[in-house]
Amino acid sequence: MTTLHTPVLIIGAGATGAGVARDLALRGVASLVVEQADINAGASGANHGLLHSGCRYVSNDAHTARECHEESLRLKRLMPQCIEDTGGLFVAVAGDDEDYVARFPDLCRQCGIPVTPLAPAEARQMEPALSEHTIAAFQVPDASIDPFRLVIQHLDQAVELGARLLRYHRVVEMAPCRGAVRSVTLYDSKAQKTVTVQADQIVNAAGAWAGQVAALAGAGLPMRYSKGTLVVTHSRMTHRVINRLRPPGDGDILVPGGTVSILGTTSVTIDDLGQIWPTVSETDRIVAEGSRMVPSLARARFIRAYAGVRPLVDPRPRDGNDRQISRGFVLMDHGADGIANLATITGGKLSTFRIMARETADQVCRRLGIAAPSLTGSQPLPDPPQTAWSEPGRSSRIWLRQSRPDDRLLCECEMVSEKMVDEVLDRLRTRGVCPELHALAVRTRVGKGACQGAFCSLRLLAHLYQREAVSGAAGLGQLRRFFEERWKGQRPVLWDGQLAQAELSEALYCGLLGLEREGATAFEAWRSP
Amino acid sequence: MRPGFLGDCDVAVIGAGLAGSAAAVFAVDRGLSTLVCGDSGQSCFASGLFDLLGAHPADSDRFLADPWEGLEALRRHCPDHPYARLRREQIQSAVAAWLAHLADCGLAYRHQPQRNLLVLTAAGTLKPTYAVPPTVWPGIQALAEGKRALIAGFHGLREFSAHQIAAVAARLWPSLRPVCLDFPDGRPGAERAPELMAMAVVREEVRRRLAEALRQAAADAEVVGLPAVLGRQADERWWRDLQARVGRPIFEIPTLPPSLPGLRLREALTDRMRRSGMDLAVPGRVQRVEIQQRHFHLELVEGHQSRRVLARSLIVATGRFLGGGLTADRQTIREPLLDLPVVQPPHRRDWHRPRFFDPAGHPINRCGLVVDDAFRPLDARGRAVHPRLAAAGTILAGHDWAREKCGSGLAVASAWAAVNTLARELDGKAPRPLA
């Protein structure tokens, strides 16, 4: 059996895990990041992409509000490539709680967040899509953030500085022995074998799965899974982030990102982490709510829905409303569990991921006796061009600007070309990552446009075969899995134009290619004459 | 503005896809004055293969070798399937008449009467079909005999990878060898579209150099497979010429839509309609249809022009969601032209299954117009909406053409039945003189 040694094992390649890896790497501490799926697989890849100004939390969590505001200013300075500084509005419509509206500006000021009141007419001039029933509006410093680029670039720098990433490696065993976890067993689901890791320190950054990971070490971590569903529009609806000016509820934030807008969310308690997908009724609910602020949402074309799980740490019995549980993060040192070298970091939100990572890395360094301070608060995030293809609209801009006669588009909705894919492919190969369809899609925009992968995944697959990145019939399995994954998101938004798209997929994948049946048994009738 | 009057006819067919075209051709055969209106909708996605029935039951893990046996089983299991309303002889007559028409247009489709063919797709998978254009046929034979074949792709033709085809098909056709060539039209590295390549193939110089490259790459291969790029029209000339130059049988593999075998089929049909000298293929969208006692009043809009047609009978062959024959909002599926009842699952959450590749197929695929045995749409009370209103093609309820691999057969057989109904209804009833 393979045994790997590392000073720090980080479990989870979401924003937090990637943040810890980079923070440690900048202090000269090597780490091994292990992930049961691919990067951004959990909530880090299924969120609003909102860099909070903090205003959303002013009424019930002033600390979080203040923290969000200060951190958003810092991130805008240190990693501008991941952020679109759209600005935001908070708007109330007729029927909303006017008392809350009246208190809002003072609450923001108390948290140090600058807000500007706008007359409804003024707000509608800035954002013509707003409802004519808008009764109040405030301008706030919200922004949108690309969580994929964020994680890709954090890991990229960490790896550059000596960290390692193992994807599709799930932690299966983590037995404490004499007050510490000495060895961790991983299951490599691609190679179907186990790997042992010996680590001095272990960071559990598994997001919603943190409770399961902690339980392997015999540590208790009471978690509540709150599923949030979001929908993506076909085209961008507003210039700015639009928030409903009311206590947090369903369908009350619309975040623009590149060429699309994302409307969300819901908050539904679920028991099973295997059941994270958006449903038809959730989709209908958020569209109905969202269209109170932006009426055109009722007629808009949506290209997909998705769902993520907020990992909430909640010691109380299950009775209350999930929206009342703090969205602050929890860093546990597991001293009380009798484990000296395990840290769990969970809860929190994308906007404060860097703080979560810094505090975790601080604790790890203290335990390792390393005095080097965190540098993530002052060092800008590098922006190598090969790691930037997840940004919506970037590939189209570049394609249009420097269209090369020897290059060809693989994805026409998002304008991703062969050369762009090759850049990512080469980078993955030099990083030792197996370049399958999903890995490339997550790192580019392939499959995220209107056709939801119907055409481009076939083209991308053909390209991978030509580049000898796939062999045998394995590519078809990748194609089926990739399409099934996209399907989860398409199913709730299939009416009107997207329904016709789904019919086209049906005609292509089943009618023309017969991909719904696999294996030689399908053709047994032709075997014997 | 009073719409300009265009004319009257025995049969107006709305929809110029496969079902609409077949209905028009069959109606003309019956001596009915016929007018086709509307666009060809989703038929630009046709592959050019003629599927009769390739899978039944839908959730079986096998494809069907004998489509007729499958039809018998389907008739027993699925009484609501459009095929179940037709006797075997009717389907046979429809298919035979259709294939004869295609041959007449220069597209001599090949088939084996009792058995589905296995065809190699552009993804390297195999799929069953009933009849194929002549340029596809040598591949069917070569696969059945396990011949050594060269599969040649071209740099710049994005969704066609010869390496993928050879790798994926290896289990069932191990003697495939892939090669990727430069298409010899003097534009190496350029992006390729099958239609443009097909235009280049007309040039003798291109064919000569292509043949040279293929001959060199072929080595011991007995047969050569190419993406379908050998000519735009239903014309075997370029294909035959290339075969002679390469000295081996050559077969085409339909590319992703729009694929040339599909485009050739459409072009051949349009040409046939034109040649038959009828008022066929009226352009423009049908905006409105009013059913009056004796006539159907159709209002067609093309650009700023609006025109009126009077028809003594009507065939609705407008397709499904892609063709615009059905529309859906978040709550309901509707037939937008005549507001005919659409049988459908009660709620949107039941339209699709959680897994796309679920072998059972998605319930929405079986929604559509319910018809009687004469292929006349039924109203909410289960009675024919009008004695001379029929429907054909994928808009019908009860089938899952993509999963059952029955799109072409369904279109042709239902068009046949619909035309028979209207011919019967019109027979002996002298057309009312028009003012």
Image (cartoon, coloured by chain):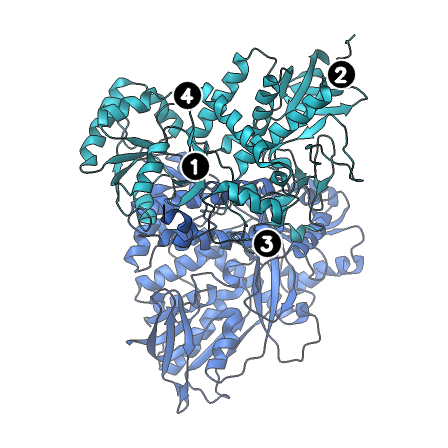
Chain colours: A blue, B cyan
Residue A221: image location, x then y, percent: 55, 80
Disc 2 crowd rating (10 Å Cα; few below 14, some 14-19, many 20+) is few
| Label 4: chain letter | B
Residue B308: image location, x then y, percent: 71, 16
Q: Residue at x 52, y 65 (%)?
A: A352
Q: From mark 2 to mark 4, how far is it between C-alphas?
A: 41 Å
Disc 4 crowd rating (10 Å Cα; few below 14, some 14-19, many 20+) is some
The label nearer to you, 1 versus 4, is 4
Residue A257: image location, x then y, percent: 54, 48
Residue A262: image location, x then y, percent: 59, 50
Label 2: which residue? B429
Q: Is residue A330 above or below residue A410?
A: below
Q: Are marks 2 and 3 in contact (CB under 8 Å)?
A: no
Q: From mark 2 to mark 1, how far is it between C-alphas?
A: 47 Å
Judging from the image, what secondary structure is the residue with disc 1 in?
A: loop
The label nearer to you, 2 versus 1, is 2
Instruction: Say which quadrant the C terminus of chain A sits in.
Output: top left
| Label 2: chain letter | B
Q: Are marks 1 and 3 in contact (CB under 8 Å)?
A: no
Q: Earlier in the sequence, mark 1 or mark 4?
A: 4
Label 4: which residue? B233
Label 3: which residue? B353
Is residue A285 or residue A257 the one in the foreground? A285
Instruction: Say which quadrant the N terminus of chain A sits in.
Output: bottom left
